[in-house]
C-alpha cells in the first residue's frame, strides 16, 4: 500500500515494511545492529545491558578468589614493589580495555576476538582466535568449578568426595550459563561481585583484628612481612603472571560492549571497574600480607581461623557460582 494514499499513516513518520528471510512482511525493526541484525518487536534484545550492568559484568570477570593470591605476590616481591607492579599492570590492562571500546565503535560488526582475527588474517584467523578464546574461557570456567568444590568441602568439612561437588557445580553452571543474553546475567553479576567482595573483606578485617598469622599446630608466629623482596627470576615472573591473571577478564569485554544498550558509556563503566578492582587488590593484599606474612594460609580464606573460613566461604559460594556461569556463558556463545 502506498503510504501517501493511506489516511491512517503520517507521511512524515511512516514505517516502511521490510521483507523477512521467510517472505512475510514485517514492520520496520525497532533496532538495527551490525552484529545481531534487525531486532523486531517481541524478539530477544541482545543490546540491552545498561552501563551499570556493564560495570557489574566487568568487575565479575576480573574479581574472583584470585584476589587472595595477592599476599603471596607481595611475599615474593615485597609490599612496595608489589604495589608498584600491580598499578603498572592495572594501567596496561586499562589501556587495552579502553582500546576494545574504541575498536568496537570503529568496527560495529565485531562481536568477539574471533571477529578481530578474521579482520587480521581472514578465515584462518577467525577459527584460530575463536578456538583460543573458547578454550581460554572453558579452562577459566573449570577453575571456577574447582573453586566451588573447594568451597563446598570447606563448608561440609570434606563430608563428600570432591568429584561429587565438581559435578554439582557443573550442573549449576550448565543450567544458568544457558541464559540467553548478558543483560539477563548482569543482575547475577551484581550479586556475585558483592558476595566475593564481602568474603574477601571478611577475611581481611578478621586478619587485622586477629593481628597475627594463622597458628600452625597451635603455635603462633610473628608476621615476617617484607617491604622489599629478593626473588629469583622464576619467582618474580610467577608473581607477574599471577597479577596479570587477576586482570585477565579483558577478552570478555568485546562481548560485553557488543551487548551494551549505549556503548558510549563503556568508558565510564570501565573506569569505575578498574579503579574498584585495583583498590580492592591493593587493600586486601597489603592488609592480609602485613598481618600474616609468609604464613598466609592457602587458600587464603583460612588465614583467620576455621570459623572465619566457613563464614567467608559461605559468602563466596554464590559469587563463585556466578563466576562459573559468566565464564562458561561467553565460551558457549562463541561455540554457537
Image (cartoon, rainbow, N blue to C red):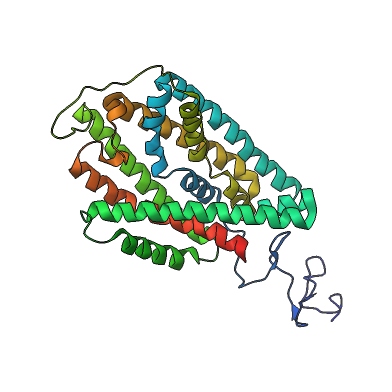
Nearest the eye: 134 or 285 = 134
Q: Residue furthest left?
A: 218
Query: For residue 198, what is the image quadrant?
Result: top left
Q: Residue at x 52, y 60 (%)?
A: 329
Pinpoint residue 281: horizontal percent, then vertical percent: 42, 33
**Relative vertical location of residue 303 with respect to residue 122 in this rendering, above or below:** above
**Relative vertical location of residue 232 with respect to residue 258 in this rendering, above or below:** above
Q: Residue at x 45, y 66 (%)?
A: 174
- Is 134 displayed left or right of 70 in the figure? right
Pinpoint residue 153: horizontal percent, then vertical percent: 26, 54
Q: Residue at x 23, y 47 (%)?
A: 311
Quarter that holds the C terminus? bottom right
Q: Residue at x 52, y 46 (%)?
A: 58
- Is 274 displayed left or right of 156 in the figure? right
**Relative vertical location of residue 270 with respect to residue 336 in this rendering, above or below:** above
- Is 186 displayed left or right of 300 in the figure? right
Nearest the eye: 285 or 240 = 240
- Is 324 displayed left or right of 293 in the figure? right
Pinpoint residue 212: horizontal percent, then vertical percent: 21, 27
Nearest the eye: 163 or 36 = 163
Residue 295 visible from this viewpoint: yes
Quarter that holds the N terminus? bottom right
Nearest the eye: 101 or 239 = 239
Residue 261 visible from this viewpoint: no
Amino acid at each position: 500500500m502506498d503510504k501517501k494514499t493511506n489516511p491512517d499513516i503520517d507521511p512524515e513518520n511512516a514505517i516502511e515494511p521490510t521483507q523477512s528471510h521467510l517472505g512475510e512482511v514485517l514492520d520496520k525493526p525497532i533496532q538495527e545492529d551490525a552484529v545481531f541484525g534487525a531486532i523486531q518487536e517481541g524478539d530477544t534484545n541482545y543490546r540491552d545491558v545498561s552501563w551499570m550492568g556493564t560495570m557489574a559484568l566487568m568487575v565479575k570477570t576480573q574479581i574472583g578468589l584470585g584476589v587472595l593470591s595477592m599476599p603471596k605476590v607481595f611475599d615474593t616481591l615485597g609490599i612496595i614493589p608489589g604495589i608498584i607492579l600491580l598499578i603498572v599492570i592495572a594501567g596496561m590492562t586499562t589501556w587495552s580495555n579502553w582500546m576494545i571500546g574504541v575498536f568496537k565503535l570503529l568496527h560495529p560488526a565485531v562481536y568477539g576476538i574471533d571477529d578481530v582475527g578474521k579482520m587480521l588474517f581472514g578465515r584462518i584467523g577467525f577459527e584460530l582466535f575463536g578456538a583460543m578464546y573458547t578454550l581460554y574461557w572453558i579452562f577459566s570456567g573449570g577453575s571456577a568449578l574447582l573453586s566451588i568444590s573447594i568451597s563446598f568441602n570447606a563448608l561440609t568439612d570434606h563430608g563428600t568426595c570432591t568429584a561429587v561437588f565438581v559435578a554439582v557445580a557443573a550442573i549449576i553452571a550448565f543450567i544458568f550459563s544457558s541464559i540467553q543474553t548478558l543483560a539477563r546475567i548482569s543482575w547475577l553479576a551484581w550479586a556475585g561481585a558483592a558476595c566475593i567482595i564481602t568474603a574477601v573483606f571478611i577475611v581481611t578485617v578478621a586478619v587485622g583484628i586477629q593481628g597475627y598469622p594463622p597458628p600452625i599446630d597451635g603455635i603462633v608466629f610473628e608476621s615476617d612481612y617484607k617491604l622489599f623482596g629478593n626473588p629469583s627470576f622464576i619467582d618474580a615472573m610467577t608473581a607477574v603472571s599471577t597479577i596479570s591473571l587477576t586482570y585477565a577478564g579483558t577478552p570478555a569485554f568485546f562481548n560485553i560492549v557488543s551487548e551494551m544498550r549505549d556503548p558510549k558509556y563503556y568508558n565510564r563503566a570501565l573506569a569505575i571497574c578498574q579503579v574498584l578492582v585495583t583498590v580492592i587488590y591493593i587493600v586486601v593484599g597489603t592488609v592480609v600480607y602485613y598481618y600474616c606474612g609468609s604464613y598466609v594460609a592457602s587458600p587464603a580464606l583460612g588465614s583467620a581461623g576455621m570459623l572465619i573460613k566457613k563464614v567467608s566461604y559461605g559468602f563466596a559460594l554464590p559469587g563463585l557460582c556466578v563466576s562459573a556461569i559468566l565464564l562458561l556463558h561467553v565460551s558457549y556463545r562463541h561455540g554457537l
